[in-house]
Amino acid sequence: MGGAHSRRSMHNARALSVLLVAVVLDVAPGCSSSPDAPTDGAPTNQDGGASDAKAPGQSGGNEGGKGDTGTNPPPGDDDDDDAGPVSGWPDPNAGGGTPPDFGANVLILDPSMSKSDIQSALDKISTKQNIPPQQQGGGDYVYGAEFSKARYAILFKPGAYEADVKIGYYTQVIGLGHVPDDVTITGAVRSRSDWRTDDPGDALINFWRGAENMGVIPTLDSNTSIWAVSQATHLRRMHIHGPVALSDGGWSSGGYISDSKIDTEIRSGTQQQFLTRNTEFASWNGGSWNMVFVGDPKTPPARGPARRTPSSRRRRSSARSRSSSPRRTTITSWSPR
């Protein structure tokens, strides 16, 4: 009896956590985040009252031999990945609901918004996080938002956009699709050094920024994605439909690209050090002191001591898939096999 109660409690806790996560990500539109919504997890009807509808798999009686308490079966009875929808999870086909308010520092963009509204919202953040340096009385510079307290997350819902996404300090840009190309941005997702009026092009202090999980079709900067950065930065799960430049005419020093696909070349330019991991690119041009390639299929010829590594596996992979296999035809985790 105690064991059954424990399993039901674990299952209910699991279902509740999934519901909460789904509400936060707005993938369960039927859930409500209004203050008037019941707090006991019960579904509601349009009038705000408790609904008599039951989740799939629930019943008031002893149907199918699954127990006589009206609760869902304990985990393990329906955990097969191919068994269909999980009992107690939100219905992915439910109607739309009110998304939660994440606050002023989280910008959620939808392809139904107008192009001008999207660009205006993006420019408002980038202008604040790319403030030009200000020279003080003693001749020293204060470098804009380098040590500001502002932090921003820009989230793109799946769809196609035309936008210039200029990423500044303490800004993370994320696509909310299952694979990168579920969010496709025609224009730019870029980090430049044009804000450095004291030393144009210098990217040595372009820190603390990143972009992930989106496709980019570059149409600015000579159809090139400029990612001029130096340390504490990342590009993850990106599909760049064109070349990438890792500098902007001045010095740059450090960065990280992983689980990405660059359709043409990566130009390292003045980069002094860089790490790419499990990334597909047609070619890598340039390089300075420390260029590290882990699991990349087309690394440039080494100019010093070097050792090639197989594709690096994620922790969630099975023991069999962690070994280097000749049957594997792609490097990224999201590309079709």
Image: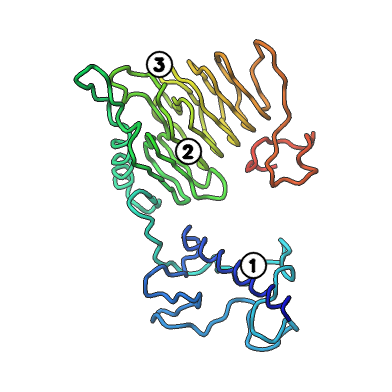
Whole-percent x and y of residue 98?
Answer: 39, 65
Relative to the observer, which residue lies in front, 172 or 269?
172
User: In this figure, which colouring scheme has been used for the structure?
Assistant: rainbow
Q: Residue placed farthest to the bottom in the image?
A: 61
Whole-percent x and y of residue 229?
Answer: 45, 26
Q: CA distance from mark 1 to mark 3?
A: 53 Å
| Residue located at (50% from left, 74% from top) | 41
| Residue located at (61% from left, 66% from top) | 14
Q: Is residue 125 above or below residue 84?
A: above
Whole-percent x and y of residue 326?
Answer: 79, 33
Q: Secondary structure at mark 3?
A: loop
Pointer 1: what residue? 85
User: Is label 2 or label 1 in front?
Assistant: 2
Pointer 3: what residue? 250
Whole-percent x and y of residue 245?
Answer: 48, 23
Q: Is residue 39 left or right of residue 141?
A: right
Q: CA distance from mark 3 to mark 2?
A: 22 Å
Mark closest to the chain's N terminus, 1 or 3: 1
Q: Quadrant of the N terminus?
A: bottom right
Disc 1 residue crowd, few under 14, some 14–19, many 20+, Cα 10 Å: some
Q: Are marks 3 and 2 in contact (CB under 8 Å)?
A: no
Disc 2 residue crowd, few under 14, some 14–19, many 20+, Cα 10 Å: many
Q: CA distance from mark 2 to mark 1?
A: 32 Å
Q: Which amino acid type is marked by label 1?
A: Pro
Q: Is residue 54 above or below residue 155?
A: below
Q: Which amino acid type is marked by label 2?
A: Ala
Label of residue 211 in the image: 2
Q: Which amino acid type is marked by label 3?
A: Gly
Q: Quadrant of the C terminus?
A: top right
Q: Are marks 1 and 3 in contact (CB under 8 Å)?
A: no
